[in-house]
Image: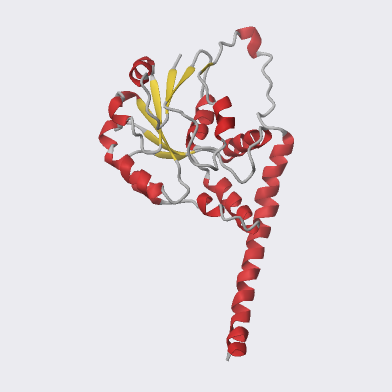
């Protein structure tokens, strides 16, 4: 049995008690509570890798490296998924696409901690769940929500998750009200031998979702690339004509 503690960025008066009970501690972005947590149990750092502020987060995180020497960095935004969503937002002429742009400043962390990323299917599954609960498609889950979803899928029977430092407020494009319904302490019940035989082998996402993913990767994304390429070529072809017309 493993007791996990997911720590957000907000102040919390009960952090020390929760940390003393935890076997594994998971922090978010620049880890503002790192100095107050036991270094040996700081196992994961979930870091956003999109938007304009990633460089500042990375610098602050590096300044706290002595408090989290044994951690592993998890990139919260799957690059393939968010690249597709960026292009879809651009096609719809929504200015929010800039907040989805991927940043590569996280690479400065590679020599300090191991780095991994959340999978495409995990990202897609969570996005579909939030949209079904009312999240507008233009929005995105917070880093804390992504960390909680990823962590809840690592649980074995008897494991638990405790939550500290979450106020569910901040950037207006995160679905805070929906996330407040999902991000809660939980304990996974034990599964007895006779119950294991009844566990379904059906994937945790419906077939229709898999077909949507296939369409995004195989059909829509290449079409987007072709359309943007044609537009760029047309601009280049027409630019001499426009210059001569002005003359």
Residue drawn at x 70%, y 38% is 209
Residue drawn at x 65%, y 29% is 204
Q: Does the image show residue 112? A: no
- Give how far across and how far down residue 65 sits, in percent: 28, 37
Farthest residue toward the bottom?
247
Q: Quadrant of the C terminus?
A: bottom right
Farthest residue toward the left?
66
Residue drawn at x 35%, y 15% is 17
> In which quarter of the view is residue 114 placed?
top left
Q: Does the image show residue 132? A: yes
In the image, 23 versus 130, the foreground residue is 130
| Number of numbered discs visible in the structure rendering | 0
> In which quarter of the view is residue 224 placed?
bottom right
- Give how far across and how far down residue 159 sits, in percent: 49, 16
- Give how far across and how far down residue 120 sits, in percent: 57, 41
In the image, 201 versus 26, the foreground residue is 26
Instruction: Classify 97 as above or below 31.
Output: below
Colouring chosen for the image of the structure = secondary structure
Instruction: Classify 17 as above or below 226.
Output: above
Instruction: Classify 152 as above or below 212.
Output: above
- Give how far across and how far down residue 27 sits, in percent: 40, 31
In the image, 139 versus 227, the foreground residue is 139
């Amino acid at each position: 049995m493993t007791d996990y503690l997911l720590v957000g960025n907000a102040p919390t008066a009960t952090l020390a008690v929760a940390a003393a009970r935890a076997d594994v501690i998971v922090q978010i972005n620049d880890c503002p509570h790192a100095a107050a947590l036991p270094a040996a149990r700081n196992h994961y750092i979930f870091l956003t890798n999109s938007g304009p502020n990633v460089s500042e987060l990375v610098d602050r995180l590096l300044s706290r490296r002595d408090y989290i020497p044994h951690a592993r960095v998890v990139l919260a935004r799957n690059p393939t998924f968010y690249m597709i969503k960026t292009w879809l937002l651009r096609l719809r002429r929504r200015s929010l696409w800039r907040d989805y742009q991927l940043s590569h400043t996280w690479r400065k962390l590679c020599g300090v901690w191991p780095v991994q990323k959340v999978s495409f299917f995990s990202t897609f599954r969570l996005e579909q769940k939030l949209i079904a609960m009312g999240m507008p498609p233009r929005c995105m889950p917070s880093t804390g929500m992504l960390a909680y979803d990823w962590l809840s899928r690592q649980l074995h029977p008897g494991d638990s998750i405790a939550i500290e430092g979450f106020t569910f407020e901040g950037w207006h494009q995160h679905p805070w009200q929906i996330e407040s319904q999902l991000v809660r302490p939980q304990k996974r019940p034990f599964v007895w031998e006779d119950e294991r035989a009844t566990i379904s082998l059906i994937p945790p996402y419906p077939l229709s979702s898999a077909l949507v993913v296939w369409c995004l990767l195989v059909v829509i994304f290449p079409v987007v690339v072709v359309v943007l390429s044609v537009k760029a070529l047309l601009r280049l072809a027409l630019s001499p004509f426009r210059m001569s017309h002005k003359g």
